Structures are given as structure tokens and as C-alpha cells.
Amino acid sequence: MTFAESAGGGQSMSSPESAPKSRPRSWAPLLAVCTGYFMVILDVTVINVAVPVIGRELSASLTGIQWITDGYTLVFAGLPLTGGALGDRLGNRRVFCSGVAVFTLSSAACALAPNAPFLVVARLVEGLGAALIVPGSLALLQQAYPAPAARSRAFGLWGSMAGIAASTGPLLGGLLASTVGWRWVFLINLPVGTACLVLTLRHVARSPRHAARRLDWPAQCAVVAAVALLTAALNEAGRRGWSAPAVLAGVGLAGLAAAAFAVRERLARSPALPPSLLRSRTMIGGAVIGLLFNFGFYGMVFTASLDFQHQRGFSALGTGLALFPAVAMTMFASVLSGRLTRLTGDRPLVISGMLVAALGLAGWASSGADPAYPVLVAPMMAAGFGTSFALTGSTATVMGAAPPAYAGAASALFNTTRQVGSATGVALGGSLLATATHYNTGLRTSMAIGALAYLAAAGLAWLCVPAKPKGT
């Protein structure tokens, strides 16, 4: 593929949207896309600290409280492939803007919710908006920055948004819930979403459309069922244990749905992902790398948050500040990797990033029974740095393996596997903390498993991430 084609000239596409002249060196498209992506990831974690207050004020049951947090995640995890397919067919900018509008309006509904059932439904719609935003975000960046160096920097900064949003969510949620009230956890999305929509419409070029491509609804339903069932089972595993009948049934049904998706893709005339992409070692390897490093990073953030609050007595605000070293390193690493990739290629950056992150979590696992907080700063910084340092190259690997016509689908695949990795890391970490004889033993075991996941990602990167010649 050529990145000139990806930039959206659209001459060879059916029914392209007319594109205004783009300014390839402007960072306004990056700001627009990253604003939407940050908002989506922030809403995964910002609710966690505020949900006890919400439960009390709305008289929500335990099941209602769980659905307020998990409903958003389930829809967000299950629908990105559908969002990506719609973006490729209707234009990624159009679907991205639609997602931002849905997300912003549903956030307003969440803020105005009179009772728990209303809030749960609004959160489900918010998850739908997120699933439309995320797949198009990478496709729009690839379109806006066709030059490899600029594209790598854009991918790096895009990736750092996830770590920053996930880590600052509890801090912001606790601050808002304890000062102006929990409804502001959702109200802050209104100006952010509006700004994202205005920036996108003004500064992001319209995307080519492939209107002749049909949506394979049986395949879409199968992948939605597989991801939603697996995510639900992993969420329950953290509460009920891995041997609970509901967890085992969810995992089994998710496997059947995944098998149905694979069979359908072989038979479909217009598959969601072409068989050539599903057979691509680069594409699938890059997606699995994303799953593994999200597993390690979000498992670390989750278990560290619990340790800081439940064992060390930190407040929600204090926990957010304690996690800040990892957050700060994600931004630094993304900028650095974006600058280095032109000289080294993607493979060395992904491998070195995974090894640094593995060293960090291994250091935490071996730090003793009750290490002082200063001892944990370096491991958190290493995990944050390594994950973000590798994300640029793995993102470029997945997006580079897909032809322009399937940029949205490739982005959706990458983000779906990363979401599954996050859910698995959180579920396993919660299960280990709940079932270990000593709390610190479960924490250290979780960190050790995260380190092994990073090492596996480094080995996979050696096999799957292409080595680019210098100067590309």
C-alpha cells in the first residue's frame, strides 16, 4: 500500500467524500483525534471512585452499581469492529464525528439521570459512542499524516493518551465527586466533546467511502457476542473466581462465538476482515502484542490502585498522585519513540520497550513483602515508559499491514485485542488479590505474571514486527 492512497485522495474509491486541502504539518488533526480518544478512555476509569457516591444518591442495588461501571466497558469492547467496518464504508471522519456526538449527548443524559436504570442505559449508549470513536481515530491519523516520521509521532502521542487517561481517571473522579458532585464526572465531557467535534470538522479532511462494501452482519454479531461474553466473564472472574459456573460458561460461549466468526469469515463474500489480513503474521502478531502489553500495564494500574487505597490508606486523590510517575513516563516515551522510529525502525523500539516494562514489573515482584512507596516509583516508571515506547511501533505495524480500504477494520482489531488484554489483566489481578493467602503475595504474583506477558510480547515482536531500513 502507499500512504499517499491512505491520505485520502479517493480517486480510485467508490463514492468518495470530497476532501478539502489538508495541511500535513498541522498538529490540529492530532489534537482533535486525541481529544476524542482521551475522553473515551477516561470514562473507563473516572467512574470507579465516584460510583459509591452514585449508588448512595440514586439508591442503586449492587447489580445496578456493577452495570454502571461494566455496561460501558462491555459495549465499548464488543462493538469496535462494527464501528471500524462502518468507518471504512461510510467514511471514517463521518463515523468518528457521529461517535463523538453520541458520546457527548449520552454523557449529558448520564449527568441528568434521575435513577439508576436510566443511568445504566445512558452508559450503554455512551459505550456505543466510544466504539464508533476509537476505530476511526487511528484511520484518521494515518490519513492526516502520510509521512512516516510524522505518522509515527502521531501514533505515539495517540497511544500515550490511553495511559494518561486511565491513570488520571481515579484522580479526577475522586476530585470531582468530593467537591462539585458526581454528575460533573459526566458533565466535563460536554465541553470536551464539543471541542473535539469542532476541531475534527474544521481540521480533519473528509475520508474516502467504500459504499459498495456490504456489512457482514452475521460476522459482526458473532464478534460482538464473543468479545462481550469474554469481557463479561473476565469481569465476573475478578468477583466470583475463575472456576465459577457463570465464568466458565461465559468463556465457553465466547469461544463458540469466535469459532462462528471464523467460519463466517471464510464463507462471506464481503468479510469484515479479509482472509489475507487474518493470515498476516504482521497483523495478528501486532494485535497480540497490543493484548499482552495492555494486560501488563492495566493489570499493574489496577492492582497498584487497590494497594495504595486499601493497604496503604491513600485517598483517591493521593492514589492518583502516587500513580503519576507512570503517567508522566507515557508522554515522554511516546515522543521519544516517535522521533527514534525513523532511525531504528519499529522492531527495536517494541522489543526494548517490552523488556524495560518487564524489568519494571519484575522489580516490583521482587521488592519484598512490604516495600516503601519510593521503592515502587522506578518499577512504575519503567512499566509506563516501556508500554508507551512500544505502542508507537506496534500501532504502526498493525496499521501498515492493512490496505487503506481496511484502515478502520485494522484499527478496530487492534483496539479490540487491547481492550480484551486490559479486561484480562484487571480480572486476573483482582482474582489474585482476592484469593491469595496474603494480600502482598497476590500483588507480587500479579506483577510477576505481567512481567512474563511483557517478555512474551518482546519475543513476539522479534518474530512479527518488520525491521524497517534506516531513514524510512
Image (cartoon, rainbow, N blue to C red):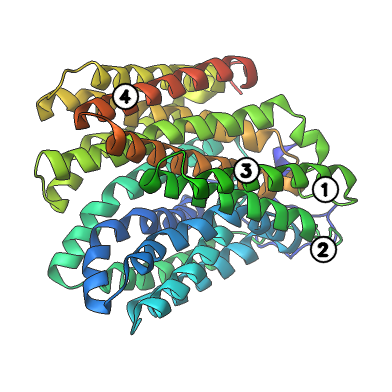
Mark 1–mark 3 Cα distance, whole angstroms, equals 18 Å
Pointer 4: what residue? 445
Q: Give the quadrant of the N terminus.
A: top right
Mark 1 Cα shell of 10 Å, populated few (<14), some (14-19), many (≥20): some
Badges 1 and 3: C-beta atoms under 8 Å apart? no
Q: Secondary structure at mark 2?
A: loop
**Residue drawn at point x = 74 percent, y = 42 percent:** 259
Pointer 1: what residue? 264
Amino acid residing under circle 4: Thr
Question: Which is in the foreground here, disc 2 or disc 1?
Answer: 1
Mark 3–mark 2 Cα distance, whole angstroms, equals 36 Å
Question: Which is in the foreground here, disc 2 or disc 4?
Answer: 4
Q: Earlier in the sequence, mark 1 or mark 3?
A: 3
Mark 4–mark 3 Cα distance, whole angstroms, equals 26 Å
Mark 3 Cα shell of 10 Å, populated few (<14), some (14-19), many (≥20): some
Tell me: 24 left or right of 369: right
Question: Which is in the foreground here, disc 3 or disc 2?
Answer: 3
Pointer 3: what residue? 252
Residue 284 in view of the camera: yes
**Residue drawn at point x = 51 percent, y = 46 percent:** 245
Amino acid residing under circle 1: Arg
Mark 4 Cα shell of 10 Å, populated few (<14), some (14-19), many (≥20): some
**Residue drawn at point x = 31 percent, y = 23 percent:** 361
Mark 2–mark 1 Cα distance, whole angstroms, equals 21 Å
Amino acid residing under circle 3: Gly
Mark 2 Cα shell of 10 Å, populated few (<14), some (14-19), many (≥20): some
Q: Earlier in the sequence, mark 1 or mark 4?
A: 1
Pointer 2: what residue? 211
Mark 1–mark 4 Cα distance, whole angstroms, equals 39 Å
